[in-house]
Image (tube, grey):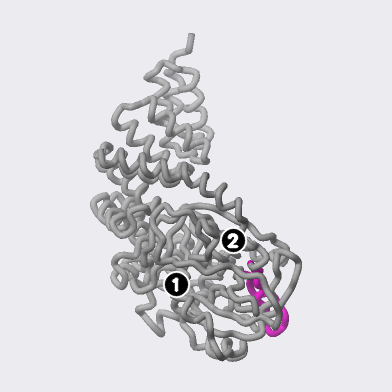
Amino acid sequence: MRNRFFLTTVSFIIASLWVLIGSANAHEVNKNAIALLIAKDKAGKTVGTGSGFVAHPEGTLITNYHVLVDAYSVEVQFPNGSHSQVESIYKVDRKQDFAILKLKEGFYSTLEIGDSSTLKPYDYTSALGYPSNHEASETKEKLVQTYGFVLGVHSQANPEIPFIYTTTPFSPGFSGGPVVNRSNQVVGLATVEGRSINLALPINPIKEFLNPQTTFSFEKLLAEDTQSQEAMYYRGNYYLYGLGDSEKAIAEFEKILALNPKFILAHYDLATAYRDMGMPEKSIAQYEKTLKLSPNFPEALSNLGGYYFREGKLDEAIQQFSKAVQSHPNFVQALSNLGAALNKQGHPHKAIAHLQQALSIDPEFAIANFNLGNALFALNRLDEAQKKFELAQNQGIDFLSMHWKLYEIHKKKRHFDKAKKELNTILDIDPLNDKAKKQLSELPTAH
């Protein structure tokens, strides 16, 4: 009864979200307050882009610190076609990843600052930013607005630094852009983009620094950043996620860890880099080091559990996935992974509740639909399983195991033409599959 109540409540909230979007759109965000930041080095070469917004009309602009790494100057563009320049820097906080900048003298449109302490799960959120592709054309990108809702406010690597976990999508280039509530008040900065989960830095820790008296230059920032582990980390992060250069990222993360073996995010992203390089043992070792330093890091728990799952260590996998869900109850990937592991362990009834919860949060999460199909298949609920497999297939899943199960379903229903189609699909994927060839030769002809 509790699970049914939860799912009904979430479904109602998600349906209500679209009403809120329409309501929010009735009073548009002041988009002319939202800036595209173009960071350049001393030679004038673009080293990155990001987003930000103006908080005070005389030109106080807020963004992420990591947007400024390696910048000698920053140009600013607004949707109405106006341009400005960052004159100096009021404040940077490398650990919390925010910066407060001073634009050249002028009069600017602003956004209203809200109160991030009032956020609750399933509250409406919207993000605004300038997607980039890390190419020369990136400065031509237009302002984009996305919509979603709050999943919760949780710490990630550092227990002292909370993030707003939200379904509102962020793209590369959104960094530093505003995340607003239904009243279009800024409640966070878009900071980390993911798939179903994105992280925004709450606005409240920034508010106390919004009336500074002094500034400093980019030259000073660059000089300080030569010794900054955070600057090294964000540089490595850019190599890894922005440029896809795992080797350069690994070199940067290892340089940090030689100075500070307790730099949690360097361990975490080093694990990702090793994963991308096809080095699972090294990746697992880094996830384990990450969790030794930060035992409740949700993404690290889920990723390590994924390795255990693939190795057949189901008890260990379930333990990691359960910890991730305990830390972050609406963590979609962890819920889906936990359901898959429970089903694999022979507990499909338990699996279904977690998978339905994941899909109530993100109905488009294809792997969760596939995993739910597997659990329903294990319970011989074949019609329901078929629908979930077909939905997962429409969402991009093309696993061999799914086609085998669809073949079994169609065969049991005596839909031999459909069964034959699945066997042919299996042979398209794996032309040397002797089992599929044998089953195809033995399949009755439909009448």
- Marked residue nearer the N-terminal end (1 or 2): 2
- Position in image of residue 132 (x %, y %): 64, 63
- Position in image of residue 355 (x %, y %): 35, 42
Residue 368 visible here: no
The mark found on residue 204 in the picture is: 1
The mark found on residue 242 in the picture is: none
Is residue 37 shown in magenta?
Answer: yes
Residue 400 visible here: yes
At a point 42% along the width and 26% down the height, the residue shown is: 407
| Amino acid under disc 2 | Leu
Category of crowding for the residue at label 1, using alpha-carbon neighbours closer than 10 angstroms: few (below 14), some (14–19), many (at least 20): some
Element under disc 1? helix
| Residue 364 versus residue 157 in the image, above or below | above
| Residue 208 versus residue 167 in the image, above or below | below
- Nearest to the observer: residue 212 or residue 200: 212
Region in magenta: 34-50
Farthest right residue?
81
- Position in image of residue 421 (x %, y %): 51, 25
Instruction: Identify residue for label 2.
Output: 128
Q: Could you say which quadrant of the image residue 1 lies in?
A: top left
Category of crowding for the residue at label 2, using alpha-carbon neighbours closer than 10 angstroms: few (below 14), some (14–19), many (at least 20): many
- Nearest to the observer: residue 156 or residue 82: 82
| Residue 225 versus residue 326 in the image, above or below | below
Element under disc 2? strand
Q: Could you say which quadrant of the image residue 153 lies in?
A: bottom left
Magenta stretch, main secondary structure class: strand
